[in-house]
Image (tube, rainbow, N blue to C red):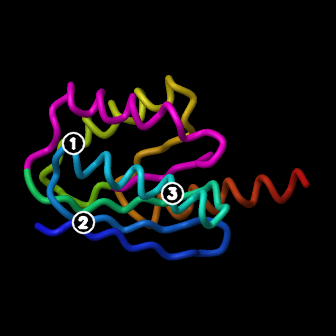
Amino acid sequence: MEYVFKLERIADYLHAKVSGNNDPATVSRYLKDVYDACLREQCPRVLVEETLEGPGLSVAEVFGVVAKASEQVWPVVQQIAYVDTNPLHDFTKMQFAEVVASNRGVNVRIFSSVRNAKQWLSSASDARSERS
């Protein structure tokens, strides 16, 4: 499957839609594209909607990709809502990815739906507005 990265600006966050093969190279590529988009758009908040084909990554692959990507995100990317739309992928591995990233200081949450991810980003935005 061909790699596709689509980006849309929604209010105060970016919505990245990614499709392609599910392998460590593709995941690393789109994480770099997300970083570059946040830097270019000067927008530190992003919703990643992933639709990758093929079996899920192994635990070792998940750890390797997430650990490497976590090294450079802050302060360019400060909040990530993440949805894997492939129902065949193991959600517990996504939760593992969340733990790996969170342990490295990345503010990331894994969601089972785009709707819930958007609500989380919106509630975080509302909380920031109230503090201003």
Q: Quadrant of the C terminus?
A: bottom right
Q: Please tell me whether residue 74 belongs to the stretch shown in magenta.
A: yes
Marks 1 and 3, the one that precedes in the sequence: 1
What amino acid type should be assigned to the residue bearing mark 2? Answer: Ser
Q: Circle 2 — which element?
A: strand
Height in image: 87 above or below 55?
A: below
What amino acid type should be assigned to the residue bearing mark 1? Answer: Pro
Q: CA distance from mark 2 to mark 1?
A: 13 Å
Q: CA distance from mark 1 to mark 3?
A: 18 Å
Give the residues in magenta: 55-83
Say whether residue 118 is left or right of residue 18.
Answer: right
User: In the image, which is nearer the foreground, mark 1 or mark 3?
Assistant: 3
Question: How packed is label 1: few (under 14 Cα within 10 Å), some, or many (20 or more)?
Answer: some
Q: Which residue is mark 3?
A: 36
What amino acid type should be assigned to the residue bearing mark 3? Answer: Asp
Q: Quadrant of the N terminus?
A: bottom left
